[in-house]
Image: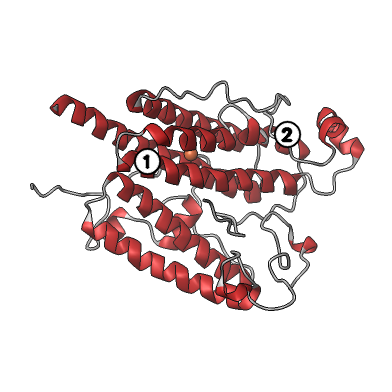
Amino acid sequence: MWAYKKMLWFPINIKKKNLKLAKAIITQYGGPYGELSAALRYLNQRYTMPDSRGKALLTDIGTEELGHVEMICTMYYQLTAGATIEELKDAGLCCNYAQHGGEIFMTDCNGVPMTTANIGATGDPLADLSEDMAAEEKARATYEHLMDMTDDPECLSVLAYLRTRELVHFTRFKELYDYYKGQMVQE
Amino acid sequence: MNQKKYRDISRNKTTQNLFPLDEALGKGTLFKNIYVPYKVDPLAPIPGDEKERLLLEMQMYALAVQDIGLYLDVEPNHKEAVEIYHEYLEKLKKANDEYESKYGTLTKTSQYVNGYPWQWDKNNWPWMMEDEYVGL
Ligand SMILES: [Fe+2]
């Protein structure tokens, strides 16, 4: 069961419209290294983790990522608030408007719909955790690219927060990976 | 059982290993040994009003609980970390209570959800901007 709490992990108050940045940020919703793909990856892999550490860590990080999905959607929502059709066309969001109107849809920044095909799920904890570590690094790199493209402090603060979370998740996945590996060597 | 040495969290050396909670929220983690800044090095977010201050307080404790919780998932036998977890969890509950009593329910099972008319659909959704707020 999941319970919804009506609050964000981190405050988001973006007052400056920026459609081009919104178009780029959407990749962290439905792109290959996005938050939704991360959430699904971990929540899917947890069932075959060999012990309670792995089940707990994947459940907790997967759940946190669901909250990050909401943060990314909030950024997109606020960055595009009040946009006219002309402005959407100028920012390359005309196809998005044609297909989805004002709705936020889970695509990468080229409009390619989210796919689960790139989610590694091997049933092998070491292989899965290696995939998870890589996923966190790829998400971190994406956040850095997004940060390169803006100087709006209201966007930078949120992107910086999300980027740090990837550092934390990477560290915990690595610790669990090393722990499992160490156990194998002992046996 | 050999005593394992934990260096990430220590109550005696809190200032050495962990960021102060408000700064931790700005940066995105409590753990100094994990944090590496990029482009900006945020400090504590600054609240605009009382409502925002309470929200920040909740977010601060929510992050602390999450961050130490993830640590405990991989270091479940670290007693001191468990104690710190409970300390922050208590503070999160208190901040949550104060916020909900003043500004409306955040979860459908909150004690403040009682009352007529239905309150859950009132107050604001987290993605909404200030000028869209409908108020209680
Ligand atoms: Fe992550």
- Residue A47 spot, x, y in % from top left: 41, 35
Q: Chain of mark 1?
A: A
Q: Nearer the viewer, residue A176 or A155?
A: A176
Spot the residue most to the left: B1
Quarter location, residue B79: bottom left
| Type of amino acid at the residue the image marks with label 2 | Lys
Establish if B86 lies above or below B19: below
Establish if A138 lies above or below B79: above
Local packing at callout 1 (Cα closer than 10 Å; few below 14, some 14-19, many 20+) is some
| Visible residue check, residue A121 | yes
Q: Residue at x 70, y 71 (%)?
A: B119
Residue behind label 2 places its C-beta within 8 angstroms of ligand 1: no
Q: Nearer the viewer, residue B21 or B70?
A: B70
Residue behind label 1 places its C-beta within 8 angstroms of ligand 1: no
Q: Residue at x 35, y 34 (%)?
A: A49
- Residue B43 spot, x, y in % from top left: 49, 56
